[in-house]
C-alpha cells in the first residue's frame, strides 16, 4: 500500500471521503440479500444510498443498474463497491428492476431508488418480513395522500387495482412504491420481466396466491425529489396509469370479463 493510501485510510477512520461518502464496502461472495438500485444521474445521493443499502444484512450485494448516467454516478457506485451494470442509454422506467433481478444472487431482493436516501434501519423490516415471516412480497405501507379534494389519478389507480384483485385491505399499497422486497420464490413465480411493470408484478403476485403484506411505512412522498424537466420529457403519470391498465388486462385474461367477481344483482341466465 502506498504511503498516501495508508494516510487516507487512517485519517478516514469511517468518516466521509470523496463525494461525502464513506470508504467502499466489500460485497459478500454468497449474498442472502440483493439490493437493486436503478440509477440515472443521481450523483448527489447515490453514495449515501449505497452506504445504507450495504448495511441491511451481513451478507449483502448491491447491484446498481446505471442507465443513461452521465454525471459521475457510475464512478461513485463503483468506488463504493457496488456491482454496476452499465447501459449508455436510458432503459425506461422500472426496466432496471428486471435487469437487476436477473443478475441477483440473493434469496431476498430489495428494491430501492438511487435518488432516495433511506436508512438501513428503515430497510431492514422488509428483509425481516421475507426471511423470518414467510412473506413473499413485503411492501411499503404507503398509499399516497387520499384526504384531498382531488386525489391523484395514480393513487386512485392503485386503490382500484387492489379492489379488483379482491385485496381492498392493501388500499393503495403496491409494487409501484419503494422500498419493497420479494422472495426468490416470488421472483421465480412471476418472472423477472414482470418487474418492469410494477402493477403487473403486483397483480401476478396476488393472483398466484403468494403472501403479500404491507410491513413497514416509509413516506416516500416526502423524500422523493421533484423532477420537473424529466417529467416534461417523459410524464410518468400516463405511463403508470397505462401499467395499471396492463395489469387489469392480464387479470381479465386469467379470469373472465368480470375479473372473477360474481354478478349478484342480475340473473343474466334468465334473459337467454
Image: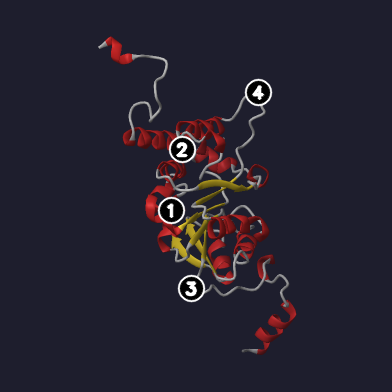
Mark 4 in CB contact with mark 1 (< 8 angstroms): no
Residue 62's x, y, as percent? 53, 65
Image depth: mark 4 or mark 3 in front: 3
| Residue carrying label 2 | 239
First in sequence: mark 3 vs mark 1 = 3
Q: Secondary structure at mark 3?
A: loop
Q: CA distance from mark 4 to mark 2?
A: 24 Å
First in sequence: mark 2 vs mark 1 = 1
Mark 2 in CB contact with mark 1 (< 8 angstroms): no
Q: Secondary structure at mark 2?
A: helix
Tell me where residue 58 sits by quadrant: bottom right
Image depth: mark 2 or mark 3 in front: 3
| Residue carrying label 1 | 186
Q: Label for residue 149?
A: 4
Q: CA distance from mark 2 to mark 3?
A: 37 Å
First in sequence: mark 4 vs mark 3 = 3
Classed neighbour count for the residue bearing mark 1: other residues with Cα under 10 Å, few (<14), some (14–19), many (≥20): many
Q: Secondary structure at mark 1?
A: helix
Image depth: mark 2 or mark 1 in front: 1
Image depth: mark 4 or mark 2 in front: 4
> Split into 4 quadrants, where in the image is the C terminus?
top left
Q: CA distance from mark 4 to mark 3?
A: 50 Å
Residue 191 can be seen in this image: no
Tell me where residue 85 sits by quadrant: bottom left
Mark 4 in CB contact with mark 3 (< 8 angstroms): no
First in sequence: mark 4 vs mark 1 = 4
Amino acid at each position: 500500500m502506498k504511503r498516501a493510501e495508508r494516510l487516507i485510510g487512517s485519517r478516514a477512520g469511517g468518516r466521509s471521503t470523496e463525494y461525502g461518502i464513506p470508504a467502499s464496502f466489500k460485497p459478500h461472495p454468497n449474498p442472502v440479500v440483493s439490493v437493486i438500485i436503478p440509477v440515472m444521474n443521481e450523483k448527489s445521493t447515490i453514495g449515501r444510498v449505497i452506504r445504507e443499502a450495504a448495511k441491511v444484512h451481513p451478507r449483502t450485494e448491491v447491484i446498481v443498474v446505471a442507465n443513461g448516467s452521465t454525471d459521475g454516478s457510475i464512478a461513485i457506485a463503483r468506488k463504493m463497491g457496488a456491482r454496476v451494470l452499465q447501459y449508455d442509454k436510458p432503459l425506461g422506467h422500472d426496466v432496471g428492476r428486471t435487469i437487476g433481478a436477473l443478475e441477483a444472487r440473493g434469496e431476498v431482493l430489495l428494491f430501492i431508488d438511487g435518488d432516495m436516501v433511506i436508512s438501513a434501519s428503515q430497510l431492514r423490516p422488509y428483509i425481516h418480513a421475507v426471511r423470518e415471516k414467510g412473506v413473499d412480497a413485503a411492501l411499503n405501507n404507503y398509499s399516497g395522500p387520499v384526504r384531498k379534494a382531488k386525489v391523484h389519478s395514480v393513487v386512485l389507480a392503485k386503490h382500484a387495482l387492489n379492489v379488483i384483485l379482491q385485496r381492498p385491505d392493501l388500499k393503495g399499497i403496491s409494487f409501484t412504491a419503494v422500498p419493497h422486497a420479494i422472495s426468490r420464490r416470488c421472483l421465480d413465480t412471476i418472472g423477472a420481466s414482470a418487474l418492469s411493470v410494477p402493477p403487473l408484478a403486483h397483480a401476478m403476485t396476488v393472483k398466484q396466491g403468494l403472501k403479500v403484506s404491507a410491513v413497514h411505512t416509509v413516506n416516500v412522498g416526502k423524500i422523493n425529489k421533484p423532477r420537473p424537466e424529466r417529467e416534461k420529457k417523459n410524464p410518468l403519470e400516463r405511463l403508470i396509469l397505462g401499467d395499471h391498465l396492463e395489469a387489469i388486462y392480464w387479470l381479465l385474461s386469467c379470469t373472465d370479463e368480470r375479473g372473477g367477481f360474481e354478478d349478484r344483482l342480475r340473473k343474466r341466465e334468465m334473459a337467454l
